Amino acid sequence: SKVIWKYAANAHHDFHVTSEGKIIVLTHEWVQGHLPGLEKLNYPIMADFIVTLSANGEEESKISVLEAFSKSSFKEILFQEPFNYLKWDATHANSIEVLDPDMASAFPAFKAGQLLLSLRNIDAIAVLDPTIPEIVWA
C-alpha cells in the first residue's frame, strides 16, 4: 500500500468516517493540571479527546470528553464509585458514532451530527453535541 497521509497521535479503539470524508477519531493524552470543575479527579490523568480530521488528514477540531462532561449536568458520573476504578483513566472511550439523520429521528432528544460515545470506566453511554461542546445525555 501507499501511505497518503498519517496522523501522529494516540488514536485508539474506534473512528467514524463521515459522508464528506472527514474522520472522527478517539484519541487520548495525559493531562497534568487540574481541569476547571474537575479538581476532584486524580491527576495526572489520561483524558479522551474527539478529533475531527479532514479528508487530507489535517486536524480540524479537538474536543476534550472530560471538559464536555464538566460543562454538563452529567459531570457527577465521573465521581461515582465504584465506576471510576482506574483513577488515572477516567472515561476510557471505546467507541464513537455520529448520529445520522435516520438515527436522530428515532430519538427525538438527539440531533443529527451529535456523537454517541461508549465510556468503559464510568459504565456509561453518552451523547456529546460537538457544536457546544457538551455532554447532552448520559
Image (cartoon, grey):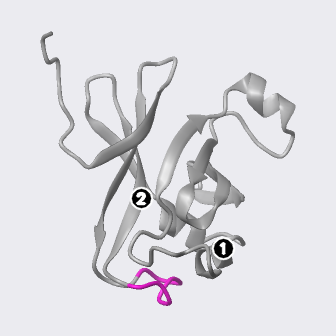
Is 33 placed above or below 133 here? below
Q: Is residue 112 rendered to the left or right of residue 133?
A: right
Disc marking residue 77: 1
Instruction: Please indicate, yes or no, whether residue 2 appears anywhere in the rendered image.
Output: yes
Is label 1 in a helix, a strand or a loop? helix
Residue type for callout 1: Ile
| Picture disc at residue 126 | none
**How far apart are labels 2 and 1 at the CA level?**
15 Å
Residue at left 52%, top 17%? Answer: 19
The residue where tag 2 is placed is 48
User: Mark 2 vs mark 1: which is more N-terminal?
Assistant: 2
**Residue 111 point in image, percent of width and height:** 74, 39
Crowd rating for badge 1 (residues with CA inside 10 Å; few <14, some 14–19, many 20+): some
Element carrying mark 2 = strand
Three-letter residue code for mark 2: Asp
Quarter of the image that includes the C terminus: bottom right
- Image position of 112 (left or right of 11): right
Determine if residue 25 is in view: no
Q: Position of residue 117 (x, y in %)?
A: 59, 48
**Residue at x-position 77% and y-position 33%:** 104
Give the camera-side residue of 62 and 1.
Answer: 1
102 sits to left or right of 132: right
Image quarter for residue 135?
bottom right
Q: Which image quarter holds the N terminus?
A: top left
- Residue at the location (59% across, 56% down)? 132
Labelled pair 2, 1 in contact (Cβ < 8 Å)? no
Which residue is painted at 54% across and 41% down in the image? 96
Residue 113: % across, % down: 62, 35
Give the extent of the magenta segment. 35-42
Extreme-top residue of the structure: 1
